[in-house]
Amino acid sequence: MKISQLYTYPIKSLRGAPLASSIVTPYGFPYDRRFMVLKVLNDGSSLAFRNMTITYFPEMVLFSQEIRLPRDGNSAGVVVVTHFSPDSNVQTQIEIPLAPDTSNLEIIDVVLHNSPTKAHVMQYEYSDWFSSRLGYPVMLVYLGPYLRPVLGNLSPPASNLEKDTGASWLSALADRVPFLGSPQAENMSGITFADVAPYLVVTEKSLEDVSSRLPDGEDMDVTKFRPNIVLAGSEKAYDEDFWGGLRISSIVKTLGEDKPVSMDLTQNCARCASLNWDYKTGKAATGESGTILKKLMKDRRVDKGTKYSPIFGRYGFLQNSIGEQRIAIGDTVEVSKINAARTIFNWPGLSN
């Protein structure tokens, strides 16, 4: 198999930014889901916030992202966000620093999928830009050095311990969850504003199966599955349900070394209504493309931990990182581990 596509999502739930290659870290691609938009809820007496995820806010798909890095390497660069208005057919843009100065930014508590952290409130100019496009008040927050704890049986230590001993996810993680909202610490599992894992891997062969459920001439858009890594060349659709690990041999040699990147695939990815969104209108799609979730419900509810949701793709964690490693489109990928049975997803609040 080979890597055919790579994507990162600097601002959570906006459309992905394609990559030709990327450094890999234990926390995902650099800049992946370091920002998130929060809806401001004001009841007249106090302020509250709601995480804006693509599941519940289809209008987020009207924002695209592009990473622009400086050639001199002296700064982190910017993410260029473009908003398309289907009503006026007008596009507007804003540039947001990928690594903003946080010294004077307010810090607030944020909880995503029961996994808490802290985040910096970005300057008003950025929040106001998003608010004016969305038509309601929102706030842009930046994770900075903070991480969220990996819950359930998603992390490799918890996944392996549960399979080997039958221990519950809670006991498996008791000594492995980092201090909530703490800065990054060595050898600790942590994630950004990605839902539950640093990487999501999908295959083109499984995508072909989804496209086959649509009318002739209509193909499923792989970006609706919001992958980080897309693989071409797997033998059968949904073979990846049983994959426990990958070994990626990079065509980009770093410092003269050629060491493969190893990744644990720990759990399945359950799918939501966002598969049905029309990326041109920011609303539920009409016709057959608006029923993708229902189509997959028929035979892809294969995970006992999320028995009401269809499965597409596997969540991944980087194994022991050795210095600076990169992956790129065209890299060769081998399955390093095959599970005897499908894994069973367990995350508090997301599993059955």
Image (spheres, rainbow, N blue to C red):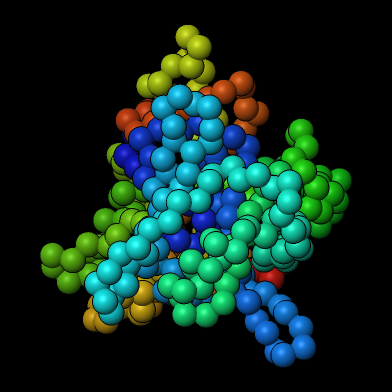
Q: How many numbered dots are placed on residues in this image?
A: 0
- In the image as oriented, which residue stretches furthest toward the left? 217
The answer to whether any part of residue 112 appears in the image is: yes
Q: Looking at the picture, tell me which residue is in the foreground, 57 or 125.
A: 125
- In the image as oriented, which residue stretches furthest toward the bottom? 44
Q: Is residue 346 left or right of residue 288?
A: right
Q: Is residue 204 left or right of residue 248?
A: left
- In the image as oriented, which residue stretches furthest toward the top? 256
Q: Is residue 101 left or right of residue 186?
A: left
Quarter of the figure with the C terminus:
bottom right
Q: What residue appears at the point 53 percent right and 40 percent down from the top-left corner?
A: 29
Q: x and y percent of residue 160 in the render?
A: 69, 43
Up-down relation of residue 290 to residue 119 (above or below): below
Q: x and y percent of residue 226 in the render?
A: 43, 56
Q: Looking at the picture, tell me which residue is in the foreground, 303 or 137.
A: 137
Up-down relation of residue 32 to residue 247 (above or below): below
Up-down relation of residue 228 to residue 20 (above or below): below
Q: What residue appears at the point 84 percent right and 49 percent down from the top-left corner?
A: 179
Q: What residue appears at the point 26 percent right and 56 percent down from the top-left corner?
A: 208
Q: What residue appears at the point 35 percent right and 79 percent down from the top-left corner?
A: 284
Q: x and y percent of residue 232 in the render?
A: 31, 41
Q: Is residue 289 left or right of residue 80?
A: left
